[in-house]
Image: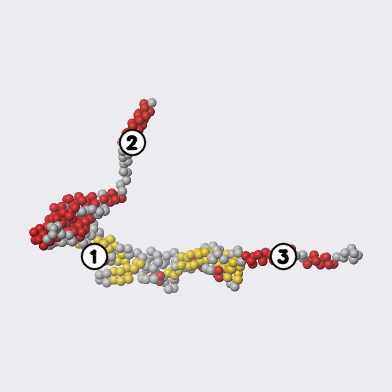
Amino acid sequence: MRLNRLLVSFVLVTLSIYAQLAEADVPPEVPNLAKSKKDRQKSEKLPPCRACTVLVNSFRDGMKRTERSKHDGGDAAWEEERLGSYKTSELRLVEIQESLCRDVGRGEDQCHLLAEEHESQIEDWWKEHQTAQPDLHQWLCVEQAQVCCPDGFFGPNCDPCPSCFGNGKCKGNGTRKGNGKCACEEGYGGDNCDSCGPEHYKSFRDTDKLLCSKCHKACAAGGCTGAGPNACRVCRSGWIMDSQRGGCTDIDECITANTCTKQQFCVNTEGSFNCLECDKSCDACDGDGPDMCKECADGFELRDGLCTVISKDESSESSSDTAELDAAPSESTESTEDTEPTKEEL
């Protein structure tokens, strides 16, 4: 009983609140249960080097937007002499910073925080170092913040990456992370991506470069020794090993395993086969078209080697001929009437 009274009280209080909100013409606040995609991207946390790179790229975009601007005023020569070059002026720096990190997409909030954190360093580079060290990314992200490495280096100490033989990427390249091992591209293997992977063969190699190509589609997991189906070590389904020449030969399933229906014809393909529909004039066929019919479908008849549709006139004539034949007296009846004598003859 007490529980019911509490429930009724809760309902009355809730209705009272909604009534007050309605009178005040204030809609009840609906909680935002899911952030929009844009909000999620804006608040996304990026790795340190990536975040610093986003900040630098945004600053560079600001430099491009303002590179043709100048001091306000009429006498540009006097302004340059008195106020200094706009290219390296405080005014231009402020204009760049006002739009910094806007519309960067992923990690915008983090970009703003980094801009505040490194504000003094960016100003120092702007005033003192940009002429001698024009690469802001190298100066800020690599040397000052020490969250990135130069390209071709990795890890806390920016150790040099292996070459990966040009067929892979160094893990952690350009960052203070990673182990420096090679992540090989498809078709390559080995610690330095200097060998061919499964189902690939060496098509070119010199002291600096290795090129691996994919085996023919007839080859199974055993790989191959070169190009084409004749170089396969093991054959895939739909192919058979040629005992005399070696390599794989396509199986003609249209001969060995044709499972097409009566209204279909078989077309062999490499490693498989397709069942295609016969022409509508055929009830069975050996290929495409009305000239490939084994039997004609209903409403068609064979003429000059083609299954041709029977016209309505021909169909009507055929029906009339049949009806006349059915209505005509038989010869046996007529001969009987001729041989029987009448009463008058008797």
Q: Earlier in the sequence, mark 2 or mark 1?
A: 2
Q: Which residue is mark 3?
A: 324
User: Is 250 on the left or on the right of 302, as rendered?
Assistant: left
Q: Position of residue 146 (x, y in %)?
A: 17, 55
Check disc 1 and give the amino acid type.
Ser
Q: Nearer the viewer, mark 3 or mark 2?
A: 2
CA gap, disc 3 and disc 2: 91 Å
Which residue does the numbered mark 2 point to in the structure image?
22
Query: Would you call the spot at circle 1 few (<14 residues within 10 Å), some (14-19), or many (20 or more)?
Result: some
Report helix, strand or loop for mark 1: loop
Residue 53 appears anywhere in the view: no
* Residue 251, image x, y percentages: 47, 68
Q: Which residue is mark 1?
A: 163
**What residue lies at 90% left-to-right and 64% top-to-bottom?**
344
Q: CA distance from mark 2 to mark 1?
A: 70 Å
Q: Residue at x 30, y 69 (%)?
A: 211
Q: Residues within 10 Å of mark 3 (few under 14, many from 20)?
A: few
Q: Disc 2 or disc 1, which is closer to the eye?
A: 2
Task: Please give the name of the residue rendered at 44% of the width and 66% of the height, measured from the top-left corner.
Answer: 271
The Cα atoms of the two marked residues, 3 and 1, are separated by 96 Å
Q: Earlier in the sequence, mark 3 or mark 2?
A: 2
Helix, strand or loop at mark 2: helix
Q: Reading the chain from its start, which is encountered first: label 3 or label 1?
A: 1
Neighbor class of circle 2 (other Cα within 10 Å; few <14, some 14-19, many 20+) is few
The answer to which of 250 and 130 lies nearer the viewer is 130
Q: Position of residue 141 (x, y in %)?
A: 18, 56
Q: In the shown orientation, is residue 346 left or right of residue 246?
A: right
Question: Which image quarter: residue 151?
Answer: bottom left
